[in-house]
Amino acid sequence: MPRKKKQPEEQPQVEIVEVEPITIESSDEPATDGDGRIRGTVAMSRALVNAQQGLSLNEKRVMMAALRCVDSKKSPFLHGRSNGYVSVRVRADEFAALAALAPRTGEKQATAAYEGLRDGCASLQKRTLTYMDGPRKVSLNWVWKAVYHEGEGWAEISFSPDLTPHIFLLQRRFVSYQIEFARGLQSLYSWRLLELLMRERDRGRLLITLEDFRNVLEIPDTYRFADIKRRVIEMAVNELNSKADLVISWKPVKLGRAVNSLDFQFIQHPQSRLDLGDAA
């Protein structure tokens, strides 16, 4: 009996799609205005503010300097394009302004800015943020890639596509603040507390459970409340009161004999000229 000729198996069709970056060109204007204040506003979804962000201080500076370049109320998909990842440039002088590097000599300041920007880029691609979307626990990368241009004084930050809905076309339930508020902050705890306060700026009051505060600020499990009070809250409040044009007070709220929640109240400094920015 003759054998049937074996038909060749159909090969699956594979389509390779090249995705080009949607590049947002940075402005050539100085990072600071005539009064020496950093230009620009940072805006992000409330989910990002409430997330465990997983960033070091230098990484946070790089990411927020990149977000400063984004118009959060517009779509990144320009010129008829419907996909792609967004790429922005962060200059060393922008990083230097945000870090409030001491103006010793031009060369030394430039070196510190280059090193800080380079170090901030070095591990950004590995950083993830985690937040709850109802019952779902969502983890995503901050960036698609981060490229430091050695000797040129700038870095290319390409946001993860999954981050796009959290930083573009923000119409409601988002958080924004003048990036000047974060200038010179030396503690990531201070920066994260600032963002939580800006989430509730219309009320001028943040009431948060100690557990949520610990999770969002990524405070080590080994810290008792006495440690949190001294190493996190008091340090962060003191730094923000001196640098962020805010006047903040706080108190613990007990349930029985244990601290259950934290009650922060704040106002803009009466002599401050900074506008808090637009948010919903």
Image: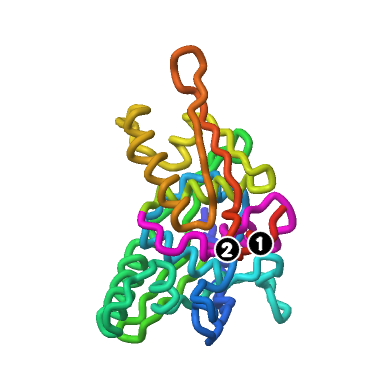
- Label 1 is placed on what type of residue? Gly
Residue 176 placement, left or right of 156: right
Q: Answer whether residue 56 is magenta in the image.
A: no
Q: Which residue is drawn at 37% across and 52% down?
A: 187
In this view, the residue in front, 235 or 159, is 235
Residue 148 visible in the shown view: yes
In this view, the residue in front, 30 or 132, is 30
- Label located before the other in sequence (2 or 1): 2
Q: Residue at x 43, y 49 (%)?
A: 190
Image coordinates of residue 95 in percent, x first then y, are 41, 72
In this view, the residue in front, 18 or 192, is 192
* The residue positioned farthest toward the top in the image shown: 256
Q: Which residue is drawn at 30% across and 67% down?
A: 119
Which residue is disc 1 drawn over? 277
Disc ID at residue 178 = 2
Element type at mark 2: strand
Element type at mark 1: loop
Q: Bin the neighbour count of mark 2 within 10 Å (Cα to Cα): few under 14, some 14-19, many 20 and up.
A: many
Above or below, 262 against 43 in this view is: above
Above or below, 231 against 144 in this view is: above
Residue numbers of the magenta segment: 160-186
Locate residue 149: give its quadrant. bottom left
Total tally of numbered discs in the picture: 2
Q: Which residue is drawn at 53% across and 61% down?
A: 9
Q: Bin the neighbour count of mark 1 within 10 Å (Cα to Cα): few under 14, some 14-19, many 20 and up.
A: some
Image coordinates of residue 36 in percent, x first then y, are 49, 76
Above or below, 60 against 203 in this view is: below
**Would you say the residues marked 2 and 1 are in contact, meaning their CB atoms lie under 8 Å apart?**
yes
- Label 2 is placed on what type of residue? Gln
Image coordinates of residue 34 in percent, x first then y, are 54, 81
Residue 5 visible in the shown view: no
